[in-house]
Amino acid sequence: MEQCYLCGKEFNENDVKKHAEHIIQQAIGGTLTVNDVLCSKCGGKLGEEIDKPFNDIFSGISTRLDIKKDRKNKKNSSIKGRFVNLKYKFKALNFFDEKYNLTLKDYQYQFNEFCNEIKEIDVVWQNLKIYPLKPFYRYINNRVEIYGQKKNIKTFRKKIEKEIKEQYGQDINIYECNDLVGLVEFPFEMDDEKFKRGLAKIAIGFASSLGIKRTEMPLVLDTKKNKIKDKINSLPFYPFGIFDKLIELQKNKFEHYPFHNLILFTLSHPTESYDKKKLICYIELFSTFQWYIVLNNNYSGKSIPYEYYAQEILKKDNYKVEINWRRYYKERKLYLDPLNITEEDIERKYSSYKRKLFSKFKWSTNSDISLLKEKYDFSKNIKNRWNIEADLIQEKTNKQRYRFDFEEYVNSIIKTIINQSLINKSKDSFKNIKYDSNHIASFIGNKTIELEYDKIWDDIDSMINFKNNMGLFFKRKYNEKYDEFDEEFIINSYRTAFYNKEHLLFYPLLKADSKDLKKYQYMKFYMLEDFIQQENFKRKFLNDK
């Protein structure tokens, strides 16, 4: 693009400068950046107005997940929560089954393992540990246990030692605990308007990066007032189709979970004129929050069959790019082109570096760095343009490592669902075999998933429905060389269309029952919460070793 999508001004080198914009907010792990959709002034404005309140909604998730962030936070990240008594709160983790009723065995388990007699208290999560905001102690099994943060426990212990001796006797042992174990709820304070506007900003940025003009997104962008609209035309995703239902039930078992995903496409309404198209962006954050943002109900531009982006979230170790400078000058394009690094990108980063450097010495950015080297005795710490270029290659390379082949991912999970359906048909043969959690047959024993697979083989209509949905993803293509038909995978139906019996339906045109949708969203949310807890246990175990 040659203009900022918010203010509509054309980019120049003076007052409308290009801005390196994260399409998905970097605070929640977004790594896709483009520099030709927003000017620096509008980027800063939307950062405060849209990004900050949007990121705050996800702070309880992003803080506890070890996600990739471009900006380093020097402070120890922490988040407040509530230690929950299982007797009083329990939410179903499944949107297909009836609510699970707790048994006496459940209560006994929590009483023994999770300090069940403790009432709900405010806690803090920090550095993989959970401790109460205010220290407290309890008497159990002829000993006293003090709970709190290490720095607070010492002061608290001195205060209560005398009281403990008088109440329980001199032989009582005192134990200190700075990490509570149990059910903890962390805040997820949903503000509908802030949430939808944050999603709209993602959709607008992604569409703009693909060449969609600002005037072609009237449902989300007010081009007269130069602002993102307050009310956004949106629709939550619900898995109506059999393939999507089976995918979502076990998504946390598939590769790359949790991830961010964007899909931009146009859709012609079956009952309306072919020329009247909807421009829609599907957004999936943390493999959990799934929404369609409608950008235009009457889009007349060039059809967009399917444009997508997908990236992992969990932090990876950086890969060190070793540049052979002797060969680099000859092979420079081989380094820059795959990373989409332009001369403009390099010059912008170099100019920014010079501005920051010279601002310390009241030096002009037009001055030569070599003059600064002569004037100041720290030449080893000053970078030239080639150093900045190498830094940019390193930075872009590490960002690219979070992207994954989304088409191959969808192909893989669709084939997994097909194979699992065949395995389930003969599941009695697999009942006594134990599989690891990643095995294709590991779903056996999960009654909910088995029940959904059983429905496939209930009757001839269900089998035809499954076959029709399978046909959306595969087509036969004639191979002249071998005089036979090859099977070709097509991704375009994923999250856009599905068959219900013999009828082809489109996701963004349907609304789910509110009760079913609520159950589904609870399931997705607690699936993510369970993953976060398991990951933190792993990280804590490695830290303690």
Image: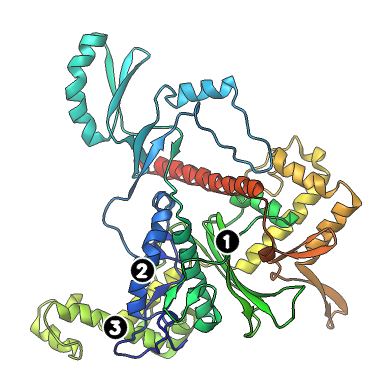
Q: Nearer the viewer, residue 271 or 247?
A: 271
The disc labelled 1 sits on which kind of residue?
A: Trp
The answer to whether residue 528 is above or below residue 322 is above
Circle number at residue 47: 2
Crowding at dot 1, Cα within 10 Å, few <14 / some 14-19 / many 20+, comes out as: many
The answer to whether residue 28 is above or below residue 187 is below
Sequence-first tag of 3 and 2: 2
The disc labelled 2 sits on which kind of residue?
A: Gly
Q: Position of residue 165 (x, y in %)?
A: 21, 12
Circle number at residue 350: 3
Q: At x 54% / y 80%, what residue is drawn?
A: 210
Q: Is residue 503 left or right of residue 157?
A: right
The disc labelled 3 sits on which kind of residue?
A: Tyr
Q: At x 40% / y 79%, what residue is drawn?
A: 38
Sequence-first tag of 3 and 1: 1
Give me the C-alpha separation between circle 3 and circle 2: 23 Å
Q: Is residue 79 left or right of residue 221?
A: left
The answer to whether residue 284 is above or below residue 333 is above
Q: Nearer the viewer, residue 495 or 48?
A: 48
Give me the C-alpha separation between circle 3 and circle 1: 38 Å
Which label sits in the foreground, 3 or 1?
1
Q: Position of residue 471 (x, y in %)?
A: 80, 65
Circle number at residue 291: 1
Q: At x 21% / y 77%, what residue is drawn?
A: 356
Q: Nearer the viewer, residue 12 or 213?
A: 213
Q: Position of residue 232 (x, y in %)?
A: 52, 66
Sequence-first tag of 1 and 2: 2
